[in-house]
Amino acid sequence: MALYKEQGIVLRTMRLGEADRIVTILSQGSGTVRAVAKGVRKTKSRFGARLEPFTHVDLLLYEGRELDIVTQADIITPFRRLREDYERFAAGEMILEAADRVSQERERNTALFLLVLNALRALDMPEGDAGFIADSFLLRLAAQAGFLPSLTACAECGRSGALRFSIQQGGMVCDDCRSGGTVRVTEDTIPYLTGLLDERPTVAPEATRQQAGHLVRAYLEYHLDRPLRSWAHVPR
């Protein structure tokens, strides 16, 4: 078996046997890696809390046929503030869940790794707005995955001034082009959605934030073809 070093973010863990865990890690250089952390659930485990979700870690692993084996783990960033606040924790869980849905095992995706890492760093800042950061992450994740919604013009004809959002048609659509179910958005929603994409916090009424969050979530779920279970717990 080959020994290799990797840097990653722990997405989730699962119990294995009496003392081990399977750890799913979004790595910088190797995509999603699933590895066994032996004895991690024992009181005197050398890994301690280093392999818990959210942790940004330096790893030394043995490459296995199906599952790799973690031999060393050192914390780079623990994201303590994120863990200690419910709103930040809920937003962080949704970020990890969405990243886990789009990442591919053994397929390098440095852009996704950095997107997740920067979102967690933003959540860990004292001034971070959990709802904004979570929705911004989802919209930028959609853009990175190749299905950015049209926000400033009709997705079908390119005309400006469209005030309806269509999940199936790829974003804003005008009255002439809309087909099937659409959602009429408020005047504040488009600037707010654009701010999410640009990571530029925009002051908006709560109703606008709610509508934008629902649209982003529904749009991403449509393209992922499955719901985001943790989205409901994210504050708006």
Image: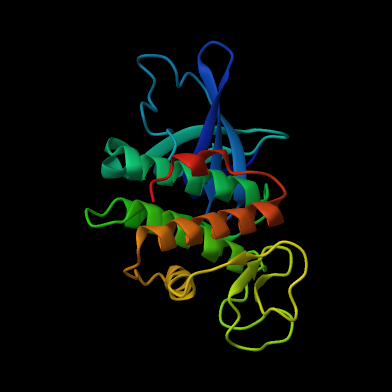
- For the point 32% across and 37% down, the residue is 86
Residue 99 appears in the picture as rendered: yes
Q: State whether residue 225 is above or below residue 200.
A: above
- For the point 73% across and 35% down, the residue is 65
Q: State whether residue 205 is above or below residue 61.
A: below
Quarter where residue 42 is shown = top left
State the colouring used for the structure image. rainbow
Residue 57 appears in the picture as rendered: no
In front here: 154 or 132? 154
In front here: 180 or 199? 180
- Where is residue 58 drawn, in percent x and y? 42, 45
If the image is split into quadrants, where does the N terminus sit? top right
In front here: 143 or 23? 143
- Where is residue 108 drawn, in percent x and y? 63, 58
- Where is residue 34 drawn, in percent x and y? 61, 37
Q: Residue furthest bottom?
A: 159
In front here: 173 or 3? 173
Q: Residue furthest left?
A: 126
